[in-house]
Amino acid sequence: MVLPPHPALHIPDTKVVLSTASVYPATTAVAFELAAKLGYDGVEVMVWNDPVSQDVEALRRLSDAHRMPILAVHAPCLLITQRVWSTDPWTKLVRARAAAEKLGASAVVVHPPFRWQRQYAREFVEGIHRMAGETDVRFAVENMYPWRYKDREMLAYAPGWDVTEEEYRHFTIDLSHVATSRVDAFAMVERMGDRLAHIHLADGSGSGKDEHLIPGRGKQPCAELLEHLARTGFDGHVVLEVNTRRSASPAEREADLAEALAFTRLHLATPARVR
């Protein structure tokens, strides 16, 4: 959905982006096809086990074929990607930065280390600060959450899942992770301040699971956050990173991603520009 120009309506220049993770288990190529078909402004590439996601030239060909720019790269930080682009976590980040620079992406999204990555965790804050000073690409460190099983809680990330406790240059806020960690989204946004550089937009019910629901289907203030971003001159990207694994068909997945895009564009439009 593209809202028409109107003298009383301010539509910011914020790019609305589709994460390739949003079509899993379909391929990276499917994400580019859907992003172009539905009218997204670009793609965030999740680097994971799909070989295309790891291949800069293959990604460039997809981007050119669909006229769909790659605006962000998500470094391979997941449990399932521990062997993607080397087993060394710093090598992964160097390659993510190189990919972003070659593809014209403005951000690399990175998770804090797992606690068992002890040496990496000890060096992470200083290392990210150093790498951020070596490039124009923003290293946007993403908030995570405690792992829970029944009444037990495990702190899986180091230095911690609440990235606002560290002095990173740039942050990604993920609203599904906010829901899982059961904290207040706007309080986290306030702590991030002008270092908030990147948004992973998805909803959550606060169930303890990382749900990545279509915005508007959970309990997070997705609409209010978008309206806040539009009013305050946010200069990063809003990335739809949602879970469509339960879609009954490709048509249902497409409808879900169209709904997510429409929701985002609607709530990024504000009655007037705040000066």
Image (cartoon, rainbow, N blue to C red):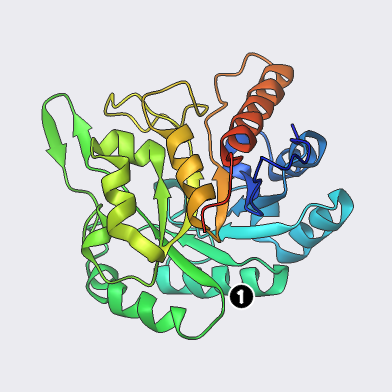
State the image coordinates of residue 188 (x, y, percent, origin top left). 29, 50
The N terminus: image quadrant: top right
State the image coordinates of residue 71 (x, y, percent, origin top left). 65, 59
Return the residue found at the far left. Answer: 151
Q: Could you tell me which residue is drawn at 67 percent across and 40 percent down?
A: 8
Reply above or below: 195 against 38: below
Reply above or below: 20 against 68: above
Q: Could you tell me which residue is drawn at 70 percent across and 61 percent down?
A: 55
Q: 163 or 80, which is in the foreground?
A: 163
Q: In this view, does 108 lie to the left or right of 50?
A: left
Q: Could you tell me which residue is drawn at 68 percent across and 50 percent down?
A: 43
Return the residue found at the far top. Answer: 248
Which of the 4 image quadrants contains residue 148?
top left
**Can the viewer see residue 256 in this picture?**
yes
Q: What element carries label 1?
A: helix
State the image coordinates of residue 104 (x, y, percent, origin top left). 70, 69
Reply above or below: 78 against 109: above
Q: Give the residue number, with chain letter if any, for mark 1.
A: 98
State the image coordinates of residue 255 (x, y, percent, origin top left). 69, 21
Q: In this view, does 50 lie to the left or right of 190?
A: right
Q: What residue type is labelled 1?
A: Ala
Q: In this view, does 27 lie to the left or right of 231?
A: right
Neighbourhood count class around disc 1 (C-alpha, 10 Å): few under 14, some 14–19, many 20 upward:
some
